[in-house]
Image (tube, grey):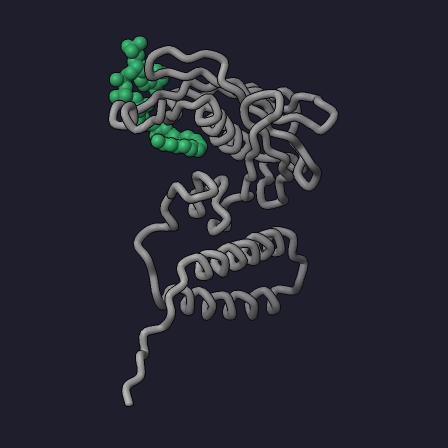
């Protein structure tokens, strides 16, 4: 009698498990910055984490999950902003804004702290960069950030809901200009961004009419 020892390999199930793992790591990261346990408990937890890290490194790919076009649209599970499989990502969940462009409801976490009790300006800029890039796609174009200009109007809080919005304002050749904001739910603008996105020449023929 022969037995097939090759395991059933279900990539979608593996990615779902990786997304659950990434979410647990986000919770771990929050627990790390907020922990107040005694030093010897931190040392014990660190030893367990070293062991867990080695288990994950037992089989290693050379890059995070790649961007792909699926039946349900574009997904990039390894992305630093939107990737469900990347613990660094919020992850940001972007929708089409009924008023045009892109919109995301989000809540920053304590791990995003810059100035005391406020979100780091670079983190806000990263979120806006991605949101502006998504708005380029919402306008039927594609591009990489050429320039990004940020105006910080008020401190951005973490641990409470805020709203990100972006929309393309103008397009010319390979260039798309986009504006965006992070606001409180009542509409108070906290951060404003303007970006110029440029379609790299190799992408020009890849964008559907
Ligand atoms: C098919 C895909 C579907 C995807 C569908 C789903 C998408 C889902 C949402 C994803 C959202 C991601 C959002 C994250 C966005 C990042 O984070 S991208 C990462 C950060 N950006 C980069 O790494 C870009 C690095 N730079 C480059 O690759 C190249 O410099 C660029 C920007 C592509 C331009 O290169 P190039 O095409 O060789 O540019 P070049 O021919 O020299 O210049 C063209 C024109 O642009 C101007 N220009 C060039 N660079 C700049 C600049 N930096 N500033 C201002 N003007 C410039 C030139 O002056 C020139 O103007 P004109 O003389 O024509 O008036």
**Within the image, what quadrant is residue 153 found in?**
top right
Task: Please state the horizontal and vertical placement of residue 133, each as a whole percent of the image.
Answer: 45, 27
Taking depth in this image into account, of 42 and 180 the one nearest to the observer is: 180
Tell me, yes or no, if residue 115 can be seen here: no
Task: Please state the horizontal and vertical placement of residue 57, each as a whole percent of the image.
Answer: 37, 64
Q: Residue drawn at (32%, 74%), measured in percent from left and top?
A: 6
Taking depth in this image into account, of 84 and 192 the one nearest to the observer is: 84
Q: Residue drawn at (66%, 26%), measured in percent from left and top?
A: 183
Tell me, yes or no, if residue 78 can be seen here: yes
Taking depth in this image into account, of 52 and 165 the one nearest to the observer is: 165
**Within the image, what quadrant is residue 8 found in?**
bottom left
Q: Quadrant of the N terminus?
A: bottom left
Q: Quadrant of the C terminus?
A: top left
Task: Please state the horizontal and vertical placement of residue 71, each as a whole percent of the image.
Answer: 44, 44
Question: Looking at the picture, does residue 154 appear above or below residue 118?
Answer: above
Task: Please state the horizontal and vertical placement of residue 53, each as a whole percent of the image.
Answer: 44, 64
Q: Residue drawn at (47%, 68%), measured in percent from left and top?
A: 52
Q: Which residue of the protein is positioned furthest toward the left in this rendering?
A: 202
Q: How many marks?
A: 0
Left or right position of 172 against 186 = left
Q: Which residue of the protein is positioned furthest toward the right in this rendering?
A: 186
Taking depth in this image into account, of 126 and 40 the one nearest to the observer is: 126
Left or right position of 69 against 165 = left
Question: Looking at the picture, does residue 55 appear above or below residue 160?
Answer: below
The quarter of the image that holds ligand 1 is: top left
Q: Which residue of the protein is positioned furthest toward the bottom in this rendering?
A: 1
């Amino acid at each position: 009698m022969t037995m097939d020892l090759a395991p059933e390999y279900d990539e979608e199930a593996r990615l779902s498990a990786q997304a659950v793992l990434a979410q647990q790591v986000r919770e771990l990261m929050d627990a790390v910055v907020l922990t107040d346990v005694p030093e010897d408990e931190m040392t014990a937890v660190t030893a367990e984490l070293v062991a867990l890290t080695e288990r994950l490194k037992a089989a290693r790919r050379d890059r995070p999950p790649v961007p792909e076009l699926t039946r349900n649209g574009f997904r990039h599970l390894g992305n630093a902003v939107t990737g469900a499989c990347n613990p660094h990502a919020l992850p940001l969940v972007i929708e089409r804004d009924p008023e045009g462009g892109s919109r995301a409801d989000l809540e920053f976490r304590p791990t995003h702290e810059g100035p005391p009790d406020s979100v780091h300006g670079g983190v806000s800029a990263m979120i806006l960069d991605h949101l502006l890039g998504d708005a380029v796609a919402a306008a039927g174009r594609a591009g990489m950030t050429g320039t990004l200009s940020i105006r910080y109007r008020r401190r951005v809080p973490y641990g409470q809901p805020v709203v990100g919005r972006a929309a393309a304002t103008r397009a010319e050749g390979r260039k798309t200009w986009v504006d965006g904001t992070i606001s409180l739910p009542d509409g108070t603008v906290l951060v404003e961004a303007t970006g110029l996105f440029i379609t790299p020449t190799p992408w020009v023929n890849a964008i559907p009419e």
